[in-house]
């Protein structure tokens, strides 16, 4: 693969890692995002809201997986771009309405509400389709293998980063444990 193909593979793998972390977090704990969305869009408080969040999670996970496979890359790029535009729009809405409820966005376990992080990551995701379109529909033969490997690594690193406080707390406890004496 040439440099352009590697850059495309890396960009798509990064987008897939972000979508996968985001989708898995919503699938496991939909109420976190539901509360944040209800704060900025009160009509989102309906009984179907958790189901809608889980459907969004499934779409994000499917888009992540499809972005890594050569035959489905272009369709997934369109979906990733639409999701990114939605993330950016809700981030902007959260910022404009003074959101203070943690959203758990992108798998994060911190107390950050909808805001500029959503806007920035949403805009980055929105570039997936133009980037893929600029590289054309042809996909190098090594694309899927490289994208899968890079996305797996990216997902692990992103998960560690978004939960860094929890990881640090558990590592510190293990490191400070006194050694048993025999």
Image: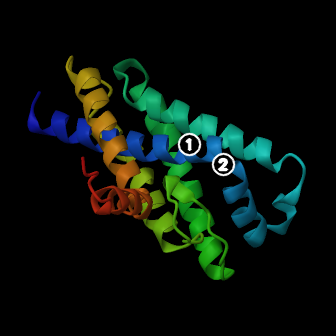
**Few, some or many C-alpha atoms within 10 Å of disc 2 (few <14, some 14-19, many ≥20)?**
some
Label 1 belongs to which residue?
A: 23
Left or right: 16, with 34 as reference point: left
**Is residue 3 positioned above or below 137 on the image?**
below
N-terminal-most mark, 2 or 1? 1
Question: Which residue appears at 51% of the width and 52% of the height?
Answer: 107
Corner quadrant of residue 120 = bottom left
Question: Are the two marked residues, 2 and 1, in contact with CB atoms closer than 8 angstroms?
Answer: no
**Is residue 135 positioned above or below 66 on the image?**
below
Left or right: 43, with 179 as reference point: right
Give the CA separation, mark 2 to mark 1: 10 Å
Question: Do we see residue 139 in this rendering?
Answer: no
The residue furthest left is 2
Question: Do we see residue 95 in this rendering?
Answer: yes
Percent coordinates x, y for residue 131 in the rendering: 32, 44
Corner quadrant of residue 1 = top left
Question: Which residue appears at 32% of the width and 36% of the height?
Answer: 151
**Few, some or many C-alpha atoms within 10 Å of disc 1 (few <14, some 14-19, many ≥20)?**
many
Question: Which residue appears at 86% of the width and 59% of the height?
Answer: 45
Q: Secondary structure at mark 1?
A: helix
Circle nearer the viewer, 2 or 1: 2
**Is residue 48 positioned above or below 99 on the image?**
above
Left or right: 148, with 126 as reference point: left
The residue furthest front is 182
Percent coordinates x, y for residue 135 in the rendering: 26, 36
Q: Which mark is residue 29?
A: 2
Percent coordinates x, y for residue 71 in the rendering: 39, 18
**Is residue 11 positioned above or below 168 on the image?**
above
Percent coordinates x, y for residue 58 in the rendering: 62, 34
Question: Which residue appears at 47% of the width and 45% of the height?
Answer: 21
């Amino acid at each position: 693969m040439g440099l352009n193909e590697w850059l495309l593979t890396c960009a798509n793998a990064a987008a897939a890692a972000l979508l996968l972390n985001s989708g898995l977090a919503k699938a496991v704990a939909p109420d976190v995002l539901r509360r944040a969305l209800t704060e900025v869009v009160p009509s989102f408080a309906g009984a179907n809201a958790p189901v809608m969040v889980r459907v969004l999670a499934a779409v994000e996970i499917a888009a992540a997986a499809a972005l890594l496979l050569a035959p489905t890359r272009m369709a997934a790029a369109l979906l990733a771009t639409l999701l990114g535009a939605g993330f950016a729009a809700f981030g902007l809405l959260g910022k404009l309405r003074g959101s203070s409820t943690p959203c758990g966005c992108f798998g994060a376990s911190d107390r950050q509400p909808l805001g500029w992080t959503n806007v920035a990551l949403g805009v980055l995701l929105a570039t997936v389709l133009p980037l893929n379109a600029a590289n054309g529909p042809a996909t190098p033969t090594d694309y899927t293998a490289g994208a899968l490997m890079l996305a797996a690594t990216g997902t692990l690193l992103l998960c560690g980063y978004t939960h860094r406080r929890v990881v640090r707390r558990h590592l510190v406890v293990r490191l400070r444990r006194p050694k048993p004496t025999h």
